[in-house]
Image: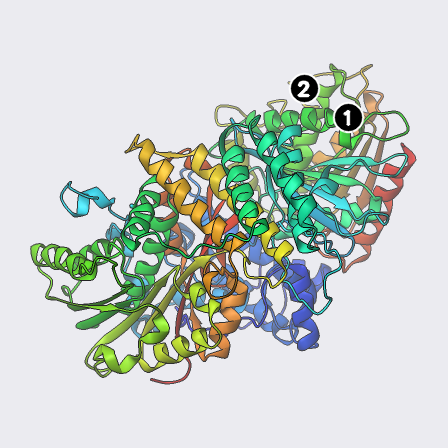
C-alpha cells in the first residue's frame, strides 16, 4: 500500500518502479476510480464522466494523424473514432478525403478496444486518444477505436456485441480495403478489458468469413475463481487490488463466478479453440501486474491450442506503462507491435 | 474545498494547443500530462505524489465512509490534480472543517433546478469538423481548428451531399459564382433523395448559399416577437436552452449564497424562461430567499408593445406566489453596447450582489468593432459577483468564408441530428420541432449569407471567449460536479437522451451530442480583491 504515515518520507513500492509522472497519472486515476465504485455494485457514472479528460476529434492533422467520429449503429448509439495518417499526396483532408481509400498497397486496419475494466473510459478519453494516435503513426495504419457500452449499465455480453458490430462494419467498408487484394486487413488491439473483448470477438470471427490477421493485447483482463500466486503476492502493491478486480467482474458478470468462459477462457468452463483458426496473437504482460499469472496462463493456453502466440513479458512494468512514452518498456512494446503488424501483411 | 478561483489557461485543450502553451512557459508544466489534459507543474510532481499517498492513506483509514463521502461532495476542475487532491484531503480532515464555506457541505441536489417547461410557468396559456480545404487563402488568417465532423454512418448519398455543399462554398470562396450556382442547384437535386435531418440541413445551407451567390441580403425584417416564439419552441423541443439556463442558474445560485439582496441583469430577457427556476431555488434555500431585483434587456418591438414589462409582470406574480420580494426593470436597447452601468442603478457590493447573465447574446456584439470591449467594460462597472456566459461551441466567425461555412455545416448537422433523434416525451408537438428548425435555419442563413454588421451570428468557441474574458480582466469561476450531475439528470428527461453528453472543460460545462460539444457555459468574476 502507499506510504504508511503522513510524515514518512519513504515512497511506496510502486513509486520506485515507474517514472514520477506516470506514478502521478496512474495513482490519480486509481483514486478517482476508488470514488466511483459503490459497495453495493453501484457506479457513480456522473462523477466518472465529470472526472474523465476527453478530447474532441480533429480533422486537422496533429503529428500527421487526423480523426473523426462515426455513429455506426443508431439503435445502440455505437460510435467509433476513426484515426488516419495524413496522405502525403493529399495533405490536410477535406470531407471526402475522410473516406478516400489509402494510396498504399496494403493498409493495416486496427480495430481498437480501450481499457477501463469494462466500466471506465471512452473512445474520446484523452489517454486513449493519444495512444491510438501513436499506434497509427507507428504502424502507418488506420485505426478504429470502438466506444463500446460499459458496465454496470450494460453487462456481458454487450461489449462483445458492440465489438462484433464494429468488426462487421469495418470489414464491409470499401474505403478500408487494401489495393493489393481488395480486402480489409484487420487487426484487433486493446488493453485491459479491451484485451478481453478482443479474445471474444476473435472467437466469434473464427466461425465467420471475417478474417482477423492478428490480435494485440496489452495487459488483457482475465480472472479466475482460484487466486493465482501473483494476485496473492501483488495485492495492492502496484495500483491494483483483488478487491477492485472482483468488483469489476461482478459488475460485468453479475450472476456468474470468475470461471465463466468470458472471464477465464482457458479455465474449467473454457471453450476449446484447438484446431480452429484463431488469429495469431501478441500478448504483452506487465510483470508487476496483479493478474500477470492469469495473463501468462492465457498465452500458454493459446499455445497449447496450437495458436501462433508471442508473449512479451516485461518484468518491471506495471499497469498503464504504455500510457506515457517515458520508459523502455513502452518503446520495446511499440517496436513489437510495429513488427507484428507489418510482418503479417 | 479550496476556492474555485483559478487562473484559466491562456490557450485551450487539445494536443496542439497544449504544445503551443508549453512553448510559452518552458519547463513549467509536465508536457506528457498536459497532452492528456492534466495541468501539473514539473516542479510540483513530488509534492503531488506525496499528497496522493496521503489521500490514499486517509481514504484507507476510513474505508467505509471515506470514498463514499468524497464521491458525494462537489468536485471542481479535475484537470488541476494538485488542487483536486488537496481539496479531498481537506474534506477528509476534520480539523479544517470550520474554514469551509457553506458551499461545500450545502448539497444543492435538494434544489430541483430542472427548468420548468414554458407552459407550466405561466399557467397553461403559454405562447418557445474541422477539416477545411484552404484554396488560395491568405496565410495570415489564423483559424482555430474545429472538431472533426460527427458522421452518422457513411451513407453514399449523404457524403456526396456534404461534398457538393463544400464544393459550392469553395467555389464562392474563389469567386467562381458560375460554378457555385451549378453546384447549389445540384445540391437541391441531391437532397430530394435524402430523408430526415440531412435533408433539412442541406436545404437550409443550399438556401443560404443561393442567397450569397445572388447577393440577396435582406435585412432581418422578421418581428422580434416571432424570433422569441421560435426560441420558445426550440426551448421545448430539445435540451440546449434548458441546459444553458440550468447551468447558468447553478453558478448564480452559488454566487448568491449568503446574500440578502440580489440583482440579476439579463442581457436577453426574451420570455424570461430562465428565471422561474432560479426564483424557486432561491425560495427554497436555507435561510430563506433574498430580495430579488431583475433587470431585463431586450430589443425594441415594432408595434411598440412593452414586451419586457409583460414578462416582468408575469415573473412578479410568480415571485409573489412563492414569497420573494421582487422588483423588475426593463431596458429597451438595439444593442447591448447602448447600455451602460450608470443606467442600471447598481447598488454597492455590500448591499446587493449582482449577477450578469448572457445566453447567446455576446457573440452578436462581434459584428461591430469595439462593441464587445465596450460591453465587457460596462459589465465590470456593474461590479458583478458573477457573470454567466453561454455560447454556441463553434467558430462561425472566421474571416475566411469557407472555414466558417465548414464549421457551421458540421455544427448544424450535429444539431439537427440530435433534434431528429430525440424528442421531448412530454410533448408530441410537431410544431415545436418545426419551429426549432426555423430557429436554427435562420442562424444558418445569417452565418452563411450575411456580412458586416448584419452578420450577427458570430459564434466563437469557449477557448476564444476565455481569452477575451481573461484579457478583459475576468477570472474563471468553476462549475463543479454537482452542476454536472444535475445537468446530466436533466438530459435524461429527453427521450433518446442517451446521445447527449455533458463535458467538464477546465471549470466550464459543455453540452454535446455524442462526442461533439455544441453549447458551453462558463462563469466569471472580476480579478482581484473586491
Residue B485, given in percent of the width and then of the height, sits at 38, 50
The quarter of the image holding the N terminus of chain B is bottom left
Check the residue under mark 2 and report the chain it is in.
A
The quarter of the image holding the C terminus of chain B is bottom left
Write down the chain letter for disc 1: A
- Residue A233 seen: no
Identify the residue at image location x=73%, y=20%.
A205
Q: Residue at x 78, y 58 (%)?
A: A327
Looking at the image, tell me whether mark 1 or mark 2 is earlier in sequence order.
2
Q: Position of residue B278 (x, y in %)?
A: 23, 58
Separation (CA) of disc 1 from disc 2:
10 Å
Residue topped by disc 1: A301
In this picture, is B180 found above or below B41? above
- Callout 2 secondary element: loop
Question: Which residue is denoted by mark 2 in the rendering?
Answer: A270
Residue B397, horizontal then vertical, whole percent: 55, 61
The answer to whether tags 1 and 2 share a subunit is yes
Which quarter of the figure has residue B302?
bottom left
Amino acid at each position: 500500500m502507499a506510504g504508511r504515515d503522513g510524515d514518512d518520507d519513504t515512497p511506496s513500492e510502486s513509486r520506485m518502479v515507474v517514472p514520477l509522472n506516470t506514478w502521478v497519472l496512474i495513482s490519480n486515476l486509481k483514486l478517482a476510480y476508488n470514488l466511483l465504485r459503490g459497495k453495493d455494485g453501484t457506479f457513480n457514472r456522473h462523477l466518472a464522466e465529470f472526472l474523465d479528460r476527453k478530447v474532441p476529434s480533429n480533422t486537422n492533422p496533429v503529428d500527421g494523424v487526423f480523426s473523426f467520429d462515426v455513429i455506426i449503429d443508431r439503435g445502440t448509439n455505437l460510435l467509433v473514432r476513426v484515426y488516419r495518417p495524413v496522405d502525403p499526396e493529399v495533405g490536410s483532408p477535406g470531407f471526402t478525403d475522410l473516406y478516400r481509400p489509402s494510396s498504399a498497397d496494403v493498409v493495416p486496419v486496427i480495430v481498437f478496444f480501450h481499457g477501463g475494466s469494462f466500466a471506465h473510459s471512452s473512445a474520446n478519453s484523452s489517454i486513449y486518444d493519444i495512444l491510438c494516435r501513436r499506434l497509427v503513426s507507428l504502424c502507418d495504419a488506420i485505426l478504429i477505436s470502438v466506444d463500446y457500452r460499459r458496465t454496470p449499465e450494460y453487462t456481458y455480453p454487450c461489449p462483445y456485441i458492440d465489438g462484433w458490430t464494429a468488426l462487421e462494419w469495418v470489414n464491409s467498408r470499401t474505403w478500408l480495403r487494401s489495393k493489393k487484394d481488395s480486402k480489409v486487413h484487420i487487426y484487433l488491439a486493446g488493453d485491459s478489458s479491451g484485451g478481453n473483448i478482443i479474445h471474444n470477438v476473435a472467437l466469434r470471427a473464427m466461425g465467420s468469413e471475417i478474417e482477423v490477421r492478428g490480435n494485440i493485447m496489452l495487459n488483457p483482463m482475465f480472472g479466475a475463481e482460484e487466486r493465482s500466486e501473483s494476485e496473492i503476492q501483488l495485492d495492492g502493491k502496484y495500483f491494483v487490488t483483488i478487491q477492485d478486480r472482483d468488483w469489476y467482474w461482478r459488475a460485468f458478470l453479475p450472476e456468474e463466478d470468475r470461471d465463466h468462459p468470458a472471464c477465464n477462457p482457458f479455465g474449467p468452463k473454457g471453450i476449446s479453440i484447438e484446431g480452429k483458426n484463431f488469429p495469431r496473437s501478441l500478448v504483452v504482460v506487465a510483470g508487476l501486474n496483479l493478474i500477470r499469472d492469469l495473463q501468462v496462463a492465457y498465452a500458454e493456453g493459446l499455445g497449447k491450442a496450437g495458436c501462433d502466440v508471442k508473449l512479451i513479458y516485461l518484468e518491471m512494468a506495471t499497469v498503464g506503462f504504455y500510457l506515457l512514452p517515458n520508459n523502455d518498456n513502452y518503446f520495446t512494446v511499440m517496436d513489437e507491435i510495429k513488427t507484428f503488424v507489418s510482418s503479417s501483411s | 474545498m479550496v476556492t474555485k478561483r483559478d487562473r484559466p489557461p491562456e490557450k485551450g485543450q487539445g494536443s496542439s494547443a497544449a504544445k503551443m502553451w508549453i512553448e510559452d512557459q518552458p519547463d513549467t508544466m509536465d508536457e506528457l500530462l498536459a497532452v492528456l489534459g492534466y495541468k501539473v507543474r514539473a516542479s510540483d510532481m513530488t509534492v503531488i505524489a506525496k499528497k496522493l499517498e496521503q489521500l490514499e492513506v486517509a481514504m484507507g483509514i476510513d474505508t467505509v465512509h471515506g470514498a463514499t463521502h468524497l464521491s458525494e461532495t462537489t468536485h471542481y476542475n479535475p484537470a488541476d490534480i494538485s488542487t483536486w487532491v488537496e481539496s479531498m484531503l481537506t474534506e477528509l480532515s476534520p480539523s479544517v472543517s470550520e474554514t469551509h464555506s457553506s458551499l461545500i457541505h450545502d448539497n444543492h441536489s435538494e434544489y430541483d433546478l430542472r427548468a420548468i417547461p414554458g407552459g407550466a410557468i405561466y399557467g397553461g396559456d403559454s405562447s418557445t469538423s474541422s477539416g477545411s480545404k484552404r484554396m488560395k487563402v491568405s496565410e495570415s488568417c489564423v483559424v482555430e481548428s474545429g472538431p472533426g465532423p460527427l458522421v452518422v454512418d457513411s451513407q453514399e448519398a449523404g457524403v456526396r451531399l456534404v461534398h457538393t455543399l463544400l464544393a459550392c462554398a469553395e467555389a464562392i470562396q474563389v469567386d467562381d459564382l458560375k460554378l457555385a450556382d451549378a453546384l447549389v442547384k445540384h445540391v437541391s437535386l441531391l437532397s430530394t433523395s435524402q430523408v430526415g435531418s440531412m435533408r433539412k440541413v442541406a436545404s437550409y445551407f443550399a438556401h443560404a448559399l443561393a442567397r450569397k451567390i445572388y447577393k440577396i441580403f435582406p435585412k432581418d425584417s422578421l418581428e422580434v416577437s416571432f424570433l422569441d416564439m421560435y426560441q420558445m419552441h426550440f426551448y421545448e423541443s430539445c435540451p440546449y436552452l434548458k441546459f444553458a439556463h440550468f447551468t447558468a442558474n447553478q453558478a448564480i445560485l452559488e454566487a448568491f449564497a449568503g446574500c440578502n439582496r440580489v440583482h440579476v441583469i439579463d442581457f436577453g430577457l426574451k420570455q424570461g424562461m430562465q428565471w422561474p427556476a432560479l426564483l424557486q431555488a432561491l425560495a427554497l434555500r436555507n435561510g430563506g430567499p433574498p430580495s430579488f431585483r431583475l433587470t431585463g434587456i431586450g430589443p425594441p418591438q415594432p408595434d411598440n408593445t412593452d414586451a419586457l414589462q409583460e414578462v416582468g409582470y408575469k415573473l412578479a406574480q410568480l415571485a409573489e406566489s412563492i414569497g420573494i420580494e421582487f422588483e423588475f426593470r426593463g431596458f429597451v436597447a438595439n444593442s447591448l453596447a447602448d447600455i451602460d452601468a450608470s443606467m442600471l442603478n447598481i447598488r454597492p457590493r455590500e448591499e446587493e450582489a449582482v449577477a450578469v447573465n448572457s445566453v447567446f447574446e455576446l457573440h452578436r456584439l462581434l459584428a461591430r468593432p469595439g462593441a464587445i470591449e465596450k460591453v465587457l467594460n460596462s459589465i465590470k462597472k456593474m461590479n458583478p459577483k458573477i457573470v454567466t456566459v453561454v455560447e454556441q461551441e463553434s467558430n462561425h466567425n472566421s474571416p475566411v468564408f469557407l472555414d466558417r461555412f465548414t464549421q457551421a455545416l458540421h455544427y448544424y448537422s450535429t444539431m439537427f441530428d440530435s433534434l431528429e433523434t430525440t424528442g421531448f416525451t412530454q410533448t408530441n408537438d410537431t410544431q415545436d420541432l418545426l419551429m426549432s428548425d426555423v430557429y436554427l435555419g435562420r442562424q444558418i442563413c445569417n452565418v452563411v449569407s450575411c456580412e458586416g454588421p448584419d452578420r450577427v451570428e458570430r459564434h466563437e468557441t469557449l477557448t476564444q471567449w476565455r481569452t477575451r474574458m481573461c484579457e478583459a480582466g475576468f477570472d474563471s469561476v468553476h462549475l463543479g460536479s454537482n452542476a454536472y450531475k444535475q445537468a446530466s439528470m436533466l438530459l435524461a428527461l429527453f427521450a433518446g437522451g442517451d446521445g447527449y453528453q455533458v463535458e467538464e472543460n477546465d471549470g466550464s460545462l459543455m453540452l454535446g451530442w455524442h462526442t461533439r460539444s455544441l453549447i458551453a457555459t462558463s462563469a466569471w468574476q472580476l480579478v482581484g480583491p473586491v
